[in-house]
């Protein structure tokens, strides 16, 4: 029996798409075990998989750093500690294959153990991405770049990015030298595996000529099989707005939806565990069959996460997106280019009202 260890980053979207991938393997010939998570192991166990313990990065801290363009979490000491624990686990289980989803040290660990590594990647985070990863609106250089011609700003962005990825990789280089591992060029190269699955659509995230070890697997959308009978009780005279901010979005930025003005809509929230939106016209749900809910929806307000945007696209629901970090901004840029959604960054309440109203116009053809 083939033993596969799966190392998702500790966010719900990563665990769910790893579960979708795991379900493609024959359980009678593959023993699949997931990295344990205090928050998300419940979903793993629901599908009948076991979990293992291993040191990992604090996702809340990493996301906070990402929001400030701070990459100090990728330091020598923490990287080495996580890598050594991964090596111990891989050797203990005698793994035949490891799968990582945003697991920075896993390529080193797999190489050390001489085990094949399959990496799940977003299209904008490959070395072969055919577009420029734009400077996010929250970056201090964003305003300056906005005054430049796009060709010049893209050229400068690509140059600065290349230097940044090399700088980010310096602690990895030290570890690779210490453990006599193969030299690697930069951070993007470090995120590659022996095989790589791009969990995106090529129309949204086009690539240059891809090597043979890259495959567009397409979005791995988790379809939670749960009946949502309550949907039949919605007021059919009111448009339906679904609000979901994943496990990384900022619900507090949407507190204006508590206003009585928005009682003209059916507003369904998914995952608002802090109950930021709690007015009488809000319909709160912890976890929903998003596809089933979106089939009833006229608009989705979301954070621009990978799994969420593809659920919106597949159900032809227009999206207003409020990102919490730069990778989600890259998703939203792709949505805007394709007509599937719009960035809501810097919206005041007047703009929110305007764009929600426009998105809900019956004659408005979004796609």
Image: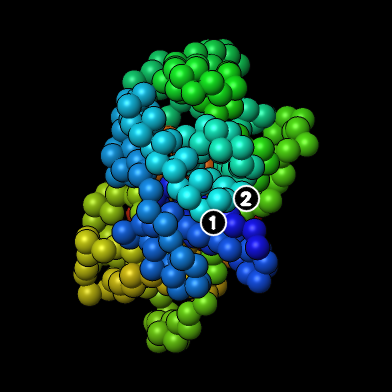
Residue 44 percent location from the top left of the image:
45, 66
Quarter assignment of residue 32: bottom right
Residue occupied by mark 2 = 96
- From the viewer's side, name the closer residue of 217 and 273: 217
Helix, strand or loop under label 2: loop
Q: Quadrant of the image for the C terminus?
A: bottom right
Residue 274 located left or right of residue 18: left
Quadrant (top left, top right, bottom left, bottom right) of the N terminus: bottom right
Front in this rendered view, residue 278 or 36 = 36
What residue lies at 61% left-to-right and 54% top-to-bottom? 219
If you read the primary sequence from the N terminus, does the residue marked by circle 1 or circle 2 appear first?
1
Residue in front for this viewpoint, 48 or 136: 48
Look at 52% across and 42% down and name the residue there: 331
234 over 181 or under it: above or below: below
198 and 56: which is toward the camera: 56
Residue 235 in view of the camera? yes
Question: Which residue shows up at 54% across the image and 21% down it?
Answer: 180
| Number of numbered discs | 2
For mark 1, give the secondary structure.
Answer: helix
Seen in the image, is 198 located left or right of residue 270? right
Q: Badge 1 is on which residue?
A: 18
Q: Which mark is residue 297?
A: none
Query: In the figure, residue 295 lies in which quadrant?
Result: bottom right
Residue 363, horizontal then vertical, whole percent = 58, 63
Q: Tell me which corner region of the image, top left, top right, bottom left or bottom right, holds residue 263.
A: bottom left
């Amino acid at each position: 029996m083939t033993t596969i260890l799966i190392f998702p980053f500790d966010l719900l979207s990563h665990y769910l798409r790893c579960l979708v991938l795991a379900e493609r393997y024959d359980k009678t010939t593959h023993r699949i075990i997931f990295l344990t998570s205090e928050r998300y192991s419940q979903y793993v166990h629901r599908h009948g998989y076991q979990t293992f313990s291993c040191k990992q990065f604090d996702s809340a801290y990493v996301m906070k750093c990402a929001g400030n363009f701070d990459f100090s979490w990728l330091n020598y000491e923490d990287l080495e500690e996580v890598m050594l624990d991964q090596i111990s686990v891989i050797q203990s289980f005698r793994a035949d294959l490891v799968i990582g989803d945003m697991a920075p040290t896993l390529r080193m660990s797999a190489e050390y153990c001489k085990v094949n590594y399959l990496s799940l990647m977003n299209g904008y985070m490959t070395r072969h991405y055919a577009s420029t990863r734009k400077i996010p609106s929250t970056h201090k250089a964003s305003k300056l770049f906005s005054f430049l011609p796009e060709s010049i700003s893209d050229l400068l962005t690509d140059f600065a990015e290349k230097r940044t990825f090399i700088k980010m990789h310096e602690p990895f280089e030290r570890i690779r030298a210490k453990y006599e591992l193969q030299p690697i060029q930069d951070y993007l190269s470090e995120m590659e595996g022996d095989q790589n699955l791009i969990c995106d659509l090529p129309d949204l995230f086009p690539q240059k000529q891809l090597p043979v070890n890259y495959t567009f697997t397409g979005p791995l959308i988790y379809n939670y099989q749960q009946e949502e009978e309550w949907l039949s009780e919605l007021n059919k005279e009111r448009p339906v707005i679904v609000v979901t901010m994943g496990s990384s979005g900022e619900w507090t930025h949407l507190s204006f939806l508590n206003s009585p003005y928005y009682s003209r809509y059916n507003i369904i929230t998914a995952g608002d565990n802090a109950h930021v939106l709690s007015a009488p016209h809000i319909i709160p749900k912890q976890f929903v069959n998003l596809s089933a809910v979106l089939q009833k929806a006229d608009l989705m307000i979301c954070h621009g996460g990978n799994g969420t945007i593809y659920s919106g696209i597949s159900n032809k629901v227009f999206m207003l997106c409020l990102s919490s970090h730069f990778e989600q901004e890259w998703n939203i840029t792709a949505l805007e280019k394709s007509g599937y959604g719009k960035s809501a960054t810097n919206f005041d309440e007047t703009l929110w009202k305007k764009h929600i109203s426009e998105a809900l116009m019956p004659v408005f053809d979004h796609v």
